[in-house]
Image (cartoon, rainbow, N blue to C red):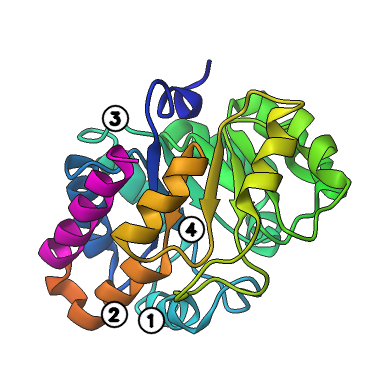
Amino acid sequence: MNKIEKAFENKKAFIAFITGGDPDIETTEKLIISMAESGVDIIEIGIPFSDPVAEGLVIQEADERALANGCTVDKLFDMIKRVREKVEIPLLFMSYINPIFVYGKERFMLNCKNCGIDGVIVPDLPFEEKDELAGECIKYGVAQISLIAPTSGERIETIAKDAAGFIYCVSSLGVTGVRGEINTSINEMIKRVKNVSSTPCAVGFGVSTPEQARDIAAVSDGVIIGSAIVRIVAEYGRECIEPVKDFTVKISDAVKKA
């Protein structure tokens, strides 16, 4: 059992997403430490990118702010090294494939290992092309997180059999963002995964309230929340630490009660 899977051991996991460098690197560093202290089990750090095709407006704007403030991949690596002195929970990078290729995939995965990144999520890398990174991920012990969606159909079982860490179950069609209701048949997707794999299933895209988190956690192994947190960061800027902490404590409590 790897470190990410252990985060799901005997409990439901709360996975939180923030955009790296929004509003600045120093605030991101404080946020990661604060969220780890407030009950978050895994943290995804988004590498800001100029063309985030899977993201809604909230995260697109966060990427723009981070890039405008000078965030780079190397600055994120340096920040994670500092964070690792205080934070034990799994940390993941969420990145599109282009920044990884531009940086150099071998160099990228080596630096992930050296700074303490446990896994990567690459939403625009189809399962059929996962070998583009699989060798480097295996070589450096970085979990390559697989995604399934309502449209994955017969591919769900194939993806699940080859999954590492956890499976990111996309709850809704379209891009990330807060939604009033989540109508996808989550149960059916997770059932098909469980028929062929024991890898934990965490559900994201649209989850934004404690009530939604509780309901999703009741039928899955974990809940992923991003846009709702990034929206708080956008509202409060450098003063976002306490408001985000208040929100994540409520979500963590709801997930634990599921």
Of marks 4 and 1, which one's residue comes earlier in the chain?
A: 1
Is 98 magenta? The answer is: no
Q: CA distance from mark 3 to mark 2?
A: 27 Å
Of marks 1 and 2, which one's residue comes earlier in the chain?
A: 1
According to the picture, the residue beneath numbered tag 4 turns out to be 73
According to the picture, the residue beneath numbered tag 3 turns out to be 88
Q: How far from the left and from the top, in percent, is residue 77?
A: 42, 48
Q: Please state which amino acid type lies under the numbered disc 1.
A: Arg
Would you call the spot at circle 4 few (<14 residues within 10 Å), some (14-19), or many (20 or more)? some
Q: Kindly tell me whether residue 111 is visible in this rendering.
A: no
Q: Which mark is residue 65?
A: 1
According to the picture, the residue beneath numbered tag 2 turns out to be 234
> Which region of the structure is painted magenta?
241-258
Residue 54 vertical placement versus 78 (above, below): below
Would you call the spot at circle 1 few (<14 residues within 10 Å), some (14-19), or many (20 or more)? some
In this orientation, which residue lies closer to the viewer: 78 or 213?
A: 213
Q: Please state which amino acid type lies under the numbered disc 3.
A: Glu
Q: CA distance from mark 1 to mark 3?
A: 28 Å
For the point 18% across and 78% down, the residue is: 236
Question: Judging from the image, what secondary structure is the residue with disc 3 in?
Answer: loop
Do the residues under discs 3 and 4 have CB atoms within 8 angstroms? Answer: no
For the point 36% across and 50% down, the residue is: 214
Q: How far from the left and from the top, in percent, is residue 89?
A: 33, 33
Residue 161 vertical placement versus 13 (above, below): above
Q: CA distance from mark 4 to mark 1?
A: 15 Å
Res. 173 image quadrant: bottom right
Do the residues under discs 1 and 2 have CB atoms within 8 angstroms? Answer: yes
Q: Please state which amino acid type lies under the numbered disc 4.
A: Val
Q: Nearer the viewer, mark 1 or mark 3?
A: 3
Q: How far from the left and from the top, in percent, is residue 94?
A: 54, 55
